[in-house]
Image: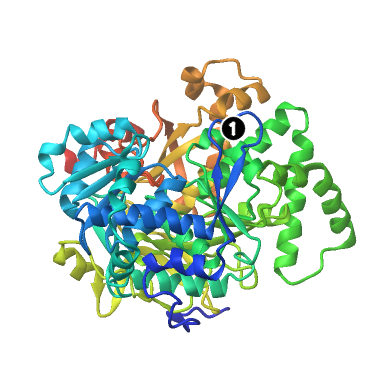
Amino acid sequence: MPTTLTEFATPILVAQPSSPNLGDLPFRNAARHPDLVAFGRRVPGSDDGPAQWEDVTASEFAADVSAVAKGLIASGLEVGDRIGLLSRTCYEWTVLDFAIWAAGGVGVPIYETSSADQIAWILDDSGARALFTETTRHADTVAGIRDRLPHLEHVWTIDGDGLDDLRTAGEAVSAADLDERRAVPTLDDLATLIYTSGTTGRPKGCEITHGNFLLLSANVIDRLTDVVADGSATLLFLPLAHVFARLIEVVAFDAGVRIGHAPDVKNLMSDLEGFQPTFLLAVPRVLEKVYNLTEAKAASGGRGKIFNAAARVAISHSRTTATGATPPLKLRLTHALYDRLVYSKLRAALGGQVKYVVSGGAPLGARLGHFYRGVGMLVLEGYGLTETTAPLSVNTPELIKIGTVGLPLPGVGVKIADDGEILVQGINVFRGYWGNDEATREALSDGWFHTGDIGALDEDGYISITGRKKELIVTAGGKNVAPAVLEDRLRASALVSQCLVVGDHRPFIGALVTLDEEMWPTWSANHGVTCSFAEAKDDETVQKALQDAVDFANEAVSRAESIRKFVVLDTDFTEANGYLTPSFKVKRHAVLKDQKAVIDDLYGGPLESDD
């Protein structure tokens, strides 16, 4: 029986980054390779057919950064001042990010979907002196809470004249003044405050330093050489307010990868076709949706059996190669046939050039991992938190075990506590929570950051995630159940949008399920269901399909951990109704609170302690 480890560390590969701080990167790149295409900038109005992109060279980007940074200095902002960023993922965000760093400032990202109260909390808690908003709608929201923000002196709007006014003001600042300012921050200084998603209460500001970003970037580049090789390109479509996309922004720019931005997911397929990235970053839900939509479209076009057979062959081919064996001749020939008929079309839909997908935020599952590798796109699943500057581990093209989240990155160590909690230390670990010493002491203890996640290390040091420590369910019979594995497998169904496993102090495990309205028209047509979406939850065919999905989920656990009953909710989990964070994590406490009556009915009554 294989032994498991309780501690594993990967030695650091790059001990000193090539830049003293993040603000230096644009000017370093411009000096080294001024004509290198650093960005593709989406041409406005190119919505019909593949999106059109214009090149931005390293020297042009440095000039954009310089003009804005000088404007920040001219506006009286000092080293260490916090500056908010409230915007979708766009080229201007990256310009502002590096301009803030070049001026010695500290960026404070805010999700553009945030409510007025959430915006007010982050700006007030961080003491931000300035804010960039993307739209006049955002600016109007901030105007309505301005009386709650005594520190806020400046608000500039990207879509208005804000950036032009800032650049004009910056003309009075010399290049020497900017050089002096951007030389001030060190690797130990604060680079950004990134607020946690707030699944359990008020978001906390994570203090991430220039060194966290730059040392991690240098070691990621060294470890993922093939992914960020010369000629590579990536299209950012996840929110740059999230640490995952922010770290990839830095890594890609540091490595000289061509970067594009896709602010509106409605145009994502057109953007992918026009930009042709070689690697993407995504969360598992995106990869699940791509699979489900492709399967549904194939079925509606009468090619469902072909797709399902092709999927089985892709998974089988990947599982065989994962063992180091050569697939049998018949499997190789069938795989080549389906590559022409199916796999090539799926790759073309993502731009035709994607070789790698870096996935994080939640477990993907081995089935989808093998499927995507089998169709020619290797999913490199990783794991991390805001407090670890995104990844603390990742699979690589050379070092990969599908179903795990990889080895710790160079310069990172992991330890499994007696209760199964994952502890981490290394170059990526934040320095604490802004203005919250108590929370910092709880999270950083004895030189280790306590992640709150439960997991294990195998005999080679690869990490597997079981679930969240605070989300463990203890049934009335005393069985500890990690809901994540059940929820991940349930969401693999094309019918299921979101789900929540319940059963704390109850006699058995149950589940709350929501239906995927986007998938409904295609799914219902493929299955001969004629009722409306509003009536779907009571349809016999839908109920049977959901039971099949539950049975599939239960295959991964023991009988005591299996889902015995489920109920379909009338409403989905969304950010708007407070059930999802901007990074698509379910706010478990909010769902449990609001759906208490439904849960009680599932079990035939409330807990005795509720009486």
Name the image quarter holding residue 610.
top left
Q: Position of residue 361 (x, y in %)?
A: 45, 54
Identify the residue at image location x=59%, y=30%: 47
Q: Name above or below for residue 476 compared with residue 386.
A: above
* Of 93 and 168, the residue lying toward us: 168
Mark 1: give few (<14), some (14-19) or many (20+) Cα within 10 Å. some
Q: Name above or below for residue 77 compared with residue 7.
A: above
- Disc 1 residue type? Ser
* Of 85 and 74, the residue lying toward us: 74
Q: Position of residue 580 (x, y in %)?
A: 36, 41
Element at badge 1?
Answer: loop
Identify the residue at image location x=65%, y=21%: 525
Res. 375 in view: yes
Question: How many labels were placed on the picture?
Answer: 1
Q: Position of residue 280 (x, y in %)?
A: 57, 53
Is 222 left or right of 432, judged from the image as shown?
right
Q: Quadrant of the N terminus?
A: bottom right
Is 448 left or right of 328, judged from the image as shown?
left
Location of mark 1 (residue): 46
Name the image quarter holding residue 500.
top left
Q: Name above or below for residue 197 compared with residue 398.
A: above
Q: Position of residue 124 (x, y in %)?
A: 16, 48
Which color scheme is applied?
rainbow
Res. 195 in view: no
* Of 44 and 259, the residue lying toward us: 44
Name the image quarter holding residue 306.
top right
Q: Quadrant of the C terminus?
A: top left
Identify the residue at image location x=17%, y=32%: 144
Is 30 left or right of 107, judged from the image as shown?
right
